[in-house]
Image (cartoon, rainbow, N blue to C red):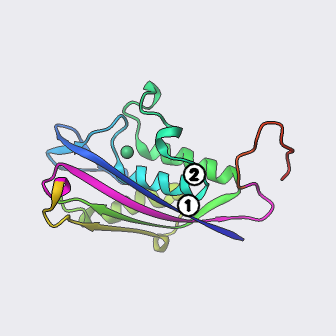
């Protein structure tokens, strides 16, 4: 069994009048995250962590924000597609840990619900998904509630005999 790790980071602006969606959960708040999709920075960070573990680039390359197909899409749906890609490479997530940096609203009360949404999508049991919330101590744009940032790290296992890389055109199958 080989193990890979990936690190993801994302930050989105908070703007008035948009629903706040984080970890696939809608959180009551007067402002939400700006984005081409639902703006779910937490899920975007997890996606980038998984793509990193696959040796791929990032969410923007896979799901461009210029593509109308992804306008307003639920980021959990994008995560589902990335987990499918992971499976096709004989890989699966073993553990994911996430830090949400938000001055407001309080995130901790929503963490369990986020885990109940994300756990099944990632194929992770309760003890293998961590979600922690921090404020930014009032510092900078996050501290002034202008943005929310998220970090995620993913440990991924790849089963022997399965391909873990991108197959190049013309390369032999069965590797
Ligand atoms: Mg994003």
Quarter, ligand 1: top left
- Most distant residue in the bottom direction: 127
Q: Quadrant of residue 106?
A: bottom left
**Cβ(mark 2) to ligand 1 < 8 Å?**
no
* Magenta stretch, residue numbers: 141-163
Is 91 placed left or right of 66 in the picture?
right
The residue drawn where x is 42% and y is 54% is: 45
Eye-nearest disc, 2 or 1: 2
- Most distant residue in the top direction: 68
The residue drawn where x is 70% and y is 53% is: 89
User: The N terminus is located in which quarter?
Assistant: bottom right
Q: Is residue 95 above or below residue 87?
A: below
Q: Distance between the Cα atoms at labels 2 and 1?
A: 9 Å
Report the front residue among 30 and 100.
100
Is 109 placed left or right of 114 in the picture?
left
Magenta-colored stretch includes residue 36: no
The residue drawn where x is 32% and y is 64% is: 111
Mark 1 crowdedness (10 Å alpha carbons): few <14, some 14-19, many ≥20 = some
* Tag of residue 170: none
Residue marked by disc 1:
123
- 2 or 1: tag closer to the N-terminus: 2
Mark 2 crowdedness (10 Å alpha carbons): few <14, some 14-19, many ≥20 = many
Residue marked by disc 2:
83
Report the front residue among 9 and 92.
9
Residue 136: horizontal and vertical position, in percent?
Answer: 20, 64
Magenta-colored stretch includes residue 143: yes
Tell me whether circle 2 and circle 1 mark residues in contact (CB < 8 Å): yes
Residue 72: horizontal and vertical position, in percent?
Answer: 36, 33
Residue 127: horizontal and vertical position, in percent?
Answer: 47, 74
Q: Quadrant of residue 132?
A: bottom left
Report the front residue among 64 and 86.
64
């Amino acid at each position: 069994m080989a193990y890979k790790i990936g690190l993801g980071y994302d930050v989105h602006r908070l703007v008035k009048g948009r629903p706040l969606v984080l970890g696939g959960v809608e959180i009551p708040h007067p402002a939400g995250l700006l984005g081409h999709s639902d703006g779910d920075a937490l899920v975007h960070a997890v996606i980038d962590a998984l793509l990193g573990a696959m040796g791929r680039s990032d969410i923007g390359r896979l799901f461009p924000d210029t593509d109308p197909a992804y306008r307003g899409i639920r980021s959990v749906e994008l995560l589902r597609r990335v987990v499918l890609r992971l499976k096709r490479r004989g890989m699966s997530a073993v553990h994911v840990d996430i830090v949400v940096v938000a001055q407001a609203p309080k995130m901790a009360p929503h963490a369990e619900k986020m885990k109940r949404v994300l756990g099944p999508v990632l194929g992770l049991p309760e003890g293998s998904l961590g979600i922690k919330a921090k404020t930014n101590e009032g510092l900078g744009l996050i501290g002034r509630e202008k943005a929310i940032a998220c970090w995620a790290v993913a440990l991924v296992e790849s089963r022997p005999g399965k391909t873990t890389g991108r197959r190049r055109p013309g390369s032999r199958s069965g590797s």
